[in-house]
Amino acid sequence: MATIRIIKGRIYYHFRCEGVKCTERSGLEASPENVQRAQKYIKLIDAEIENGIFQYERHFPHGARIQHFAPQRADLPFNRYFADWMAGKVLKETTRRNWESVFWKHLYPFFKDRPLASITRAEIRFFQRTLVDKGLEPSTINAKAMKVLRMMLHEAYIDEFIPKNPALGVKRLAQGITDIDPFTPEEREEIVAGFQKYAPRYVNYVICGFWTGWRPNEAGALRWRRVDFRQKKILIREGRVLGQMGIPKSAGSLRDIDLLPPVERALISQKALSWLLGDLVFLDDKQRPVDQELFRQKVWVPMLRRLGIRYRPPYQMRHTFATLAISVGENINWVARMLGHKSPVVTLERYNRFVPNLTRSDGKALLESIPIVKRSGVPENLVEEYQ
């Protein structure tokens, strides 16, 4: 049984693992508080030894028995290194879940418990081909499976677990440009009208999607306290991904966007649906936060099919806002700020074929492009009533 010992006023951990006696320094003086801390810690060590999951090098990386317990670096299994690598990462919960999902879905079935140092460049190329054969898009392979694998192997090389990084010479798969495929103003009108008639629970969500340029994960995380009707601003501060709240796509996406009249009317209308049900603005028909994938599958796809409109994912509402704003002459700096781009250069590169000139900067040209304000279904007098 693991115990603590006090030697010359210092606390030591004493335990037996794999038949080897170990006495390890804790670095703590023998005060009553430290004794309590050490007792809790030794109970953890004892439980790990009993359950066969004790890792000496994790608890005592500079311990006297490190050579006995640590696996030979050349023989370190791929799956074991991934667990250790992730344990040392400080990540957002959604990022951690995504990387672990990539590992168990793609990396582990291929590499399993292979010694890390035995993985070759040819095998990584073959791994890429197996994912292509499964039908994964090159962009998905590059941004998910290969990204995690490259980061793992790079850090293993830096930490001298492997003599060279076999992923260095493996090129990214060629991928086509992701098409910006926005809806036309007429299609936007039809979609809004369709939601008003057949799915009124989500019509305000859709109107805001077409008139803010925000990302779907930002809409799903919007709280009422972030809507400033007085200053005509919406404060984008969170994103909701895989049911978890966090920052949006990046810290650079934190921004204040203008509350245009169609959005103001939609949010005033939305108060009747969610104002008294909690802090989140948009809820589904079961009064839960809107799940992006469920919305796409259960609401968006059937709606477009019903209206006879060619399918494009909900994310194209963002592109619709951007392309229409740019095409009617809105100032590119204003559009970039609404979208949350770190620079207008990013916006220009992304939407360059829609840019006629750079003249306006207040949203008026966009509003004049189509009278959607009159189609939001909210009476004019309600705007003053809620301010």
Image (tube, rainbow, N blue to C red):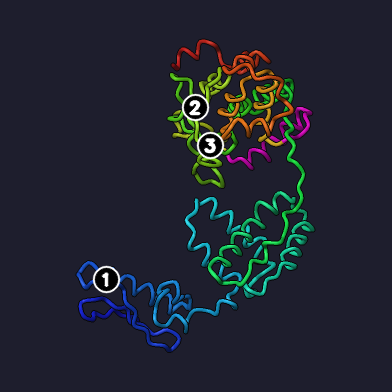
Which callout, 2 or 1, points at the residue further toward the start of the chain?
Answer: 1
Q: On the image, which quarter does residue 302 sit in?
A: top right
Q: Which residue is mark 2?
A: 234
Q: Position of residue 283 (x, y in %)?
A: 54, 34
Asked if the magenta segment contains residue 49, the reply would be no
Residue depicted at x 76% and y 32%: 305
Res 253 label:
3
Q: Which sits in the foreground, 140 or 151?
A: 151
Q: CA distance from mark 3 to mark 1?
A: 44 Å
Q: Is residue 201 visible?
A: no
Q: How far across and down, in percent of the image, does residue 73 sit?
A: 56, 76
Name the kind of residue labelled 2 in the image: Ile
- Give x and y (percent) for residue 248: 53, 40
Magenta segment: 291-312
Residue type at the position of mark 1: Leu
Quadrant of the rendering where the N terminus is positioned: bottom left
Marker disc for residue 241: none
Which of label 2 and label 1 is nearer to you? 1
Who comes first in sequence, dot 2 or dot 3?
Answer: 2
